Image: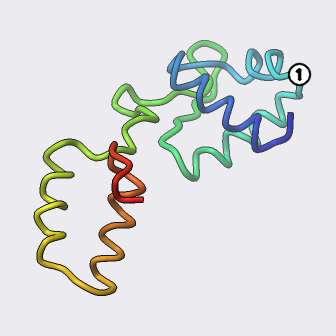
Amino acid sequence: MGPSERRSAILRLLCKRRHETAINLAEEFGVSERTIRADLVILSCYYPIQVLRGRYGGGASLPEWFRMESRTLSPKQEALLRRLRQTLDGEDLQVLNSILAQFALYWEYR
């Protein structure tokens, strides 16, 4: 398992467990605590991972509001963008279609 695969797995694991210590993660992934700490620093640049020091209660955690599947549009957001799409043309329409293709639940924009 390479570093990027390990970081993705750490993120998925944190989404599931919400809190984990560096010791447990290192043991689970078969790497050193230093490697896990470096992975957490990198992940925290992109995701709301909170790293707390301490023997009791320390470790990495994700806030309850964060979910990986939250990178999709809500039905209201998608409906608004669909309405806006009718008023656009050219490059603006292409950009809006790319947003819908990336974040909407439906595949018709691709």
User: What is the count of numbered marks?
Assistant: 1
Q: Amino acid at mark 1?
A: Gly
Q: For the point 60% across and 32% down, which residue is it?
A: 11
Q: Position of residue 89 (x, y in %)?
A: 23, 83
Q: For the point 14% across and 52% down, which residue is it?
A: 79
- Label 1 sits on a secondary structure element that is loop
Quadrant assignment, res 9:
top right
94 up-or-down from 103: above or below? below
**Which of 31 and 85 lies nearest the eye of the viewer?**
85
Quadrant assignment, res 3:
top right
Quadrant location, the C terminus: bottom left
91 up-or-down from 67: above or below? below
Looking at the image, residue 42 sits to the left or right of residue 12; the answer is right
- What residue did someone put label 1 on? 30
Looking at the image, residue 7 sits to the left or right of residue 105; the answer is right
Q: For the point 84% across and 35% down, which residue is it?
A: 34
